[in-house]
Image (spheres, helix red, strand yellow):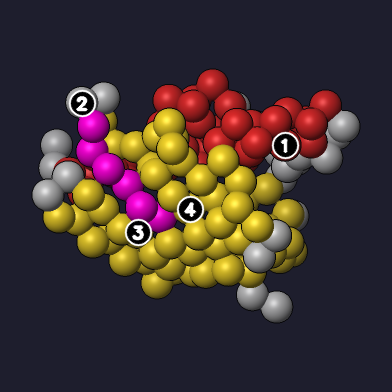
Amino acid sequence: MSDLSDIKKTREHWQKAYFEGNTDVLEQIEAQDFYVQSSSGTKDRTTRYETIQQAIESGHWFKQDITQEEDALQFLLNDGKAKISGHGRTLANGQPLSEILFEENWIKSKNGWQVKALRLNKLA
C-alpha cells in the first residue's frame, strides 16, 4: 500500500473511533504529544480522553445518527510527515450540527501513521 492509502485508512479509523468515543483506539492512533487546538483552547490527549469519557457517562456524546462530510481535502505528504486540511460538517439526521475548517499534522512511526495535532476553526 502507498503512504496515501495508508494514511487515509488510518484517518478513517481515527475519525470513527472519535465519534464512537473509543479512547482505546484514539490512544493507539494519536501520538503521545498529540493536542487539539480550537477557539476554546488547547487540550492534550489525556484531557481530551477525560472529556470524552465524561460526555459519554453523562449521555452527551454523539448519537448513532451522526454523519460527517468533508470537502476541499488536501493531503501533503513528504518524508514520513503529512499535513491534511479541509472543510468538514457534522450532521445529525441530515441537519447540520457544526461546520469547521481543520488542519491535521501526522507522522509515520514504526507503528504506522499517527496524528500529532488537530487544529479546528469553527465556522459561524
Q: Is residue 88 visible?
A: no
Badge 2: how crowded within 10 Å, few (<14), some, or many (20+)?
A: few
- The residue where tag 1 is placed is 51
When asked about the image quadrant of residue 28, the answer is top left
Q: Earlier in the sequence, mark 1 or mark 4?
A: 1
Q: Is residue 28 above or below residue 37?
A: above
Distance from Cα at disc 4 to Cα at disc 2: 21 Å
Of the image marks 2 and 3, the number of the one nearer the N terminus: 3
Residue 55 on image: x %, y %: 79, 36
Q: Amino acid at mark 1?
A: Thr
Residue 50 drawn at (x, y percent): 70, 31
**Mark 2 lies on residue:** 110
Q: Is residue 76 left or right of residue 30?
A: left
Q: Nearer the viewer, residue 35 or 52?
A: 35
Residue at 50% across / 31% down in the picture?
A: 26
- Looking at the image, the residue that sits furthest to the right is 58
Prevailing SS of the magenta stretch: strand
Label 1 Cα neighbours within 10 Å, binned few <14 / some 14-19 / many ≥20 = some
Q: Which mark is residue 118?
A: 4
Q: Which residues are magenta?
A: 104-109
Circles 3 and 1: CB distance less than 8 Å? no
73 in the magenta segment:
no
Specify few, some or many for label 3: CA neighbours under 10 Å numbering under 14, 14-19, or 20 or more. Answer: some
Q: What quarter of the picture does the C terminus occupy?
A: bottom right
Q: Residue at x 39, y 44 (%)?
A: 116
- Residue 2's image quarter? top left
Residue receiving disc 3: 84
Q: Earlier in the sequence, mark 3 or mark 1?
A: 1
